[in-house]
Image (cartoon, rainbow, N blue to C red):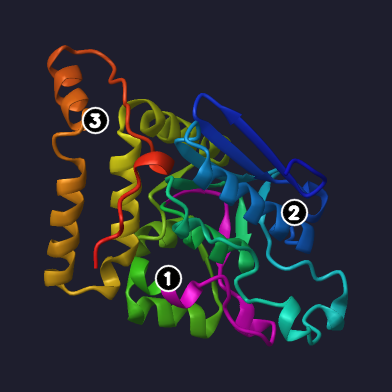
Amino acid sequence: MTGTDLRFEVDGGVALITLNRPEQRNAFSGAMGEALGHAYRTCDGDDAIRAVVLTGAGDAFCTGADLALGGETFAAREPANFSAAAFDPPAFAIRKPVIAAVNGHAIGLGFTMALQCDLRILAREGKYGVVQVRRGVMPDAYAHFTLPRIVGVSRAADLLLTGRKIDAQEAEQLGLASRVVPAAEVLPTALAIARDIAHNTAPLSVAVTKRLLWESSLLDPAAIERRETALHHHLMARADAVEGVVAYLERRAPQWKLSVSRDWPAWPE
């Protein structure tokens, strides 16, 4: 996975994925998309990885599609060779929390990939926008699913239909940012959150919570109650439910036993 367009590192249970085309302000490439999908699949399947941070090299997160081909940038593709998803799987589909450390400008696909993440730490100095309708195409990477979930349909329409750029202050007001900090603090902030998750939360508990959270907008309250109940039955009275309470009472770090890959439940209907 580590290559020209993307770097992948793991330390202390945290995977750090870095979009790595700083000279092009991390403009998205096919090689980057292929490597990002591979990295996400690795994170999903490796129990040693507890949380994921996605960031960009240099002073930008990702400025969107690489426009070096000019008018041919969005030329027709063979149906079998093109998906608007850009990479597979999306961040919301993997069973580990994904934190976008948006260290600078995130435009077009650069911003829609950040919208897939569970948390977004935005640089105060950055500009953000889903600008595709100003380039003669349309929003991608599941933006019509992620953005309305985050800000609501009316605010999503404002951003998607105008393609306008916003600053970090407006992004925070809209609820797009989990936190806004100076650019130099973005990655350290994201890594601190990821390490807290890696060290203090039960991996299977986090994984099932993440999946149900992303499903929630598609379900009615009764369906959510059925899933919450079934998943509680899967977790209660097992090793981590015991360890979490005992570790808290003994004022020590928990030693989790259940794993996402080995103990994943049959998903409730």
In this view of the protein, which residue sits in the foreground, 233 or 98?
233
Q: Disc 2 vs disc 1: which is toward the camera? A: 1
267 left or right of 261 in image: left
Q: Mark 3 near mark 1, Cβ–Cβ under 8 Å?
A: no
Mark 2 and mark 1: Cα distance apart in space: 23 Å
Which secondary structure lies at badge 3? helix
Residue segment shown in magenta: 119-145
Asked where in the image residue 92 lies, by quadrant, the reply is: bottom left
Specify whether residue 103 is in view. Answer: no
- Residue drawn at the location 50% of the way across and 73% of the way down: 143
Image coordinates of residue 19 in percent, x first then y, are 69, 48
Type of amino acid at the residue the image marks with label 2:
Arg
Residue where numbered disc 2 is placed: 25
Viewer-side label of 2, 3: 3
Mark toward the start of the polypeptide (2 vs 1): 2
Q: Secondary structure at mark 2?
A: loop
**According to the image, label 3 marks what residue?**
240
Give me the residue at 43% from left, 45% from top: 96
Question: From what the image shows, is residue 252 above or below residue 114?
Answer: above
Q: Are marks 2 and 3 in contact (CB under 8 Å)?
A: no
Neighbor class of circle 1 (other Cα within 10 Å; few <14, some 14-19, many 20+) is: many
Quadrant of the frame with the N terminus: top right
Upstream in the sequence, badge 3 or badge 1? Answer: 1
Residue at 58% across / 60% down in the picture? 127
Seen from the viewer's position, the closer of residues 4 and 265 is: 265
Name the residue rendered at 73%, 54% in the picture: 26
**Mark 3 residue type:** Asp
| Residue linked to disc 1 | 147
Percent coordinates x, y for residue 25 in the rendering: 74, 54
Residue 244 drawn in magenta: no
Instruction: Give the Cα distance between marks 3 and 1.
Output: 34 Å
CA gap between label 2 and label 3 equals: 43 Å
